[in-house]
């Protein structure tokens, strides 16, 4: 077997091995998207109900609560970045990181210092590589988020929130739009800007009498952590569904590419084999021809 | 005045139950509260315990709800709890 032919056969074999792996990853992700989507859908009523209640308090009471009022001066902001633990998901993590860099630039231009909270191994290694500091990070389980992690993140950022710490909290995550589209999104979590579902009363309108039990401040104290948790949990679920969808897409195109490579190399190796045979035949014919002429001359 | 309440019972990871009811009895941190159609808008913190729902036909439904809150607005009652399930 000729050297050229052997090289092509090796390349075909390696493309086939790669294809097996990418194909398996594609199938795994495809089977997990549906489950991740179902989890997003299942958690939606809760977060909608919480959001509506928070908007109701924010609009119908004129109580001054630290979590609802915009501070006069914002010196420090927190950004929570949601990436994945593993790569091979196309631009999934890098688009979120790019978005958070843009937000960083914007906030720094406004004269704010920034604290980072990272979710997912990709964000952590992005920061380590650039030798940048992050306040805290959570790794593991980004493809199957649990409520406890959301609670831990919420507790941490709420503890940092206040006059001394950060006055603003932003979330950056991939929103799951469809199987083929995931959009990085920035949400400002605190101070609150929720208006979903409740229309703000105009000034000459009478406030409906909302009754709070035990009282407004206690209700807000209990409600806001719940709200923050549910928003963070929602971001994690969205991000997980997006991760699976992005990985499925990336692995599908990797598999297609492997197919294309195999096809091209097969053609090349066929041509190489054919030319080898042709050469051998012409050698034989040439040799026989030479013998015949030699006989005649003798 | 509407004659029934729309009730939604929601847990952190799923919607537990929703439908029409004529009476909802829930436990807040202050004590038990009964809600009927036409109740004033309200937001209350839930104490842990049972939520009893009486359907328009008189049937009764009992659910456990913990760690959450309850809101009433235009005859829509939303009970939101981290953990909730029908008994």
Image (cartoon, helix red, strand yellow):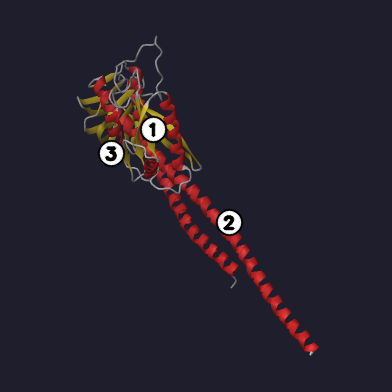
Q: Residue at x 57, y 64 (%)?
A: A8
Of marks 2 and 1, which one's residue comes earlier in the chain?
1
Local secondary structure at mark 3: strand
Q: Position of residue A145 (x, y in %)?
A: 35, 43
Spatial CA distance of label 1 from label 3 is 34 Å
Q: Quadrant of residue A68?
A: top left
Q: Quadrant of residue A141?
A: top left
Chain of the residue under the numbered disc 3 shown in the image: B
Position of the N terminus of chain A, as image quadrant, is: bottom right
User: Label 3: which residue?
Assistant: B86
Categorize mark 2 by other alpha carbons within 10 Å: few (<14), some (14-19), many (20+): few
Q: Which residue is mark 2?
A: A260
**Label 2 in the same subunit as label 1:** yes
- Who is closer to the viewer here, A12 or A28? A12
Q: Mark 1, chain letter?
A: A
Determine the secondary structure under disc 1: strand
What is the spatial separation of the Cα atoms under label 2 and label 1, in whole angstroms?
Answer: 40 Å
In the rendered image, which quarter is residue B14 located in?
top left
Q: Residue under circle 1?
A: A171
Q: Position of residue A138 (x, y in %)?
A: 32, 41
For label 1, count other residues whose C-alpha is less than 10 Å away and answer few (under 14), some (14-19) or many (20+): many
Give the secondary structure at mark 2: helix
**Residue A62: x, y in percent?**
32, 15
């Amino acid at each position: 077997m000729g050297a050229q032919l052997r090289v092509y056969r090796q390349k075909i074999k390696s493309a086939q091995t790669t294809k097996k792996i990418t194909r398996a990853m594609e199938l795994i992700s495809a089977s997990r998207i549906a489950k991740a989507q179902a989890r997003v859908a299942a958690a939606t009523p809760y977060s909608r109900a919480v959001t509506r209640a928070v908007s109701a308090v924010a609009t119908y009471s004129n109580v001054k609560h630290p979590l609802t009022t915009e501070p006069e001066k914002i010196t420090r902001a927190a950004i929570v970045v949601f990436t994945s633990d593993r790569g091979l998901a196309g631009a999934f993590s890098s688009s979120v990181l790019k978005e958070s860099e843009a937000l960083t630039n914007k906030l720094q231009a406004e004269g704010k210092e920034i604290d980072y909270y990272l979710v997912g191994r990709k964000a952590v290694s992005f920061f380590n590589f650039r030798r940048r500091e992050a306040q805290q990070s959570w790794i593991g389980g980004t493809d199957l988020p649990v409520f406890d992690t959301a609670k831990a993140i919420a507790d941490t950022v709420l503890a940092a929130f206040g006059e001394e710490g950060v006055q603003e909290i932003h979330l950056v995550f991939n929103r799951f739009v469809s199987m083929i589209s995931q959009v990085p999104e920035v949400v400002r979590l605190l101070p609150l800007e929720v208006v979903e579902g409740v229309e703000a009363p105009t000034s000459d309108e009478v406030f409906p009498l909302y009754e709070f039990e035990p009282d407004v401040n206690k209700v807000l104290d209990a409600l806001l952590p719940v709200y923050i948790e549910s928003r963070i949990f929602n971001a994690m679920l969205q991000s997980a569904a997006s991760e699976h969808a992005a990985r499925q897409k990336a692995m599908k195109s990797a598999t297609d590419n492997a197919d294309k490579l195999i096809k091209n190399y097969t053609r090349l190796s066929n041509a190489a084999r054919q030319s080898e045979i042709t050469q051998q035949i012409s050698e034989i014919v040439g040799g026989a021809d030479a013998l015949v002429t030699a006989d005649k001359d003798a | 005045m509407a004659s029934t309440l729309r009730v939604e019972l929601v847990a952190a990871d799923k919607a537990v139950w929703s439908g029409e009811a004529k009476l909802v009895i829930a436990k807040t941190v202050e004590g038990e509260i009964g809600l009927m159609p036409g109740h004033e808008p309200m937001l209350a913190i839930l104490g842990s315990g049972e939520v009893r729902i009486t359907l328009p036909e008189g049937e009764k439904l009992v659910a456990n709800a913990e760690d959450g809150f309850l809101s009433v607005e235009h005859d829509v009652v939303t009970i939101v709890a981290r953990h909730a399930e029908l008994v």
